[in-house]
Image (cartoon, rainbow, N blue to C red):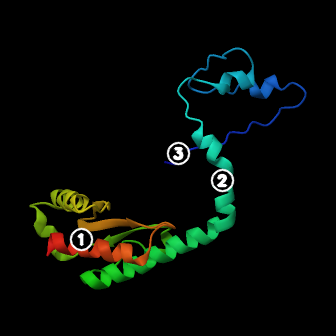
Amino acid sequence: LAPMVCSDKTCERGGPDVSMVWGSVRQPIISHGHGQGFASEFIWDGARDYSAALALPSCTAFWEAVGLKQAQGYAHGLVAYAVDKLSHRWGAEGGLFPMSLCGNMALVALPAEAKALAGNLGDAARRLQDALHDKKVECPAKVVCGKLYLRISAWIYNEPRDFLSLARAVDEVVR
């Protein structure tokens, strides 16, 4: 499995006296190299998995090949497609916000029948989300301004058929 998170930290040298800038930079977990210079203080804290750092060159190469802007554009277009298709399917009003304000996430109104899942909207949202989870579908259900919504999202590994599967799962639960 690939590491989930990695960051790259750079510190600018502050002129001839490097310790003026680097001397004030500290990490929250102290390494056994504490007090032995900048590099030693960050080198080994005893609780680090270096696989994320070792994966950085491959990650950088991947994004250079795919193109981050292209990936963001694909994801945004897919979410807009999903909002349109889901809204039409459920006879709902569409997304809570205009797509121009959405990146790769949006809130799409659920069918009116979803309200009947429980006595109040908060419980209905929880029941729907739990039922979707039981169907191996991960999609949060939210109550916003007295209405039920699904918070849908897309990324480069998603396809239009993923949202058809979501629609079918919601239909099975609420209808």
Q: Nearer the viewer, mark 1 or mark 3?
A: 3
Q: Nearer the viewer, residue 168 or 58?
A: 58
Percent from the top left, x then y, of residue 56? 65, 48
Q: Does the image show residue 100?
A: no
Q: Which residue is mark 3?
A: 3
Q: Earlier in the sequence, mark 2 or mark 1?
A: 2
Amino acid type indicated by mark 2 = Ser
Q: Where residue 102 is drawn, which disc sits there?
A: none
Query: Judging from the image, what secondary structure is the residue with disc 2 in?
Result: helix
* Percent position of residue 156, x then y: 52, 67
Q: How many other residues sit within 10 Å of disc 2, few (<14), some (14-19) or many (≥20)?
A: few
Point out the frontmost of discs 2 and 1. Answer: 2
- Distance from Cα at disc 2 to Cα at disc 3: 12 Å
The residue lying at 30 percent from left, 71 percent from top is: 166
Pinpoint residue 172: horizontal percent, then vertical percent. 17, 73
Q: Using the rendered view, name the quadrant where residue 128 is placed.
A: bottom left
CA distance separating discs 2 and 1: 36 Å
Residue in the foreground of this view, choosing between 128 and 162: 162
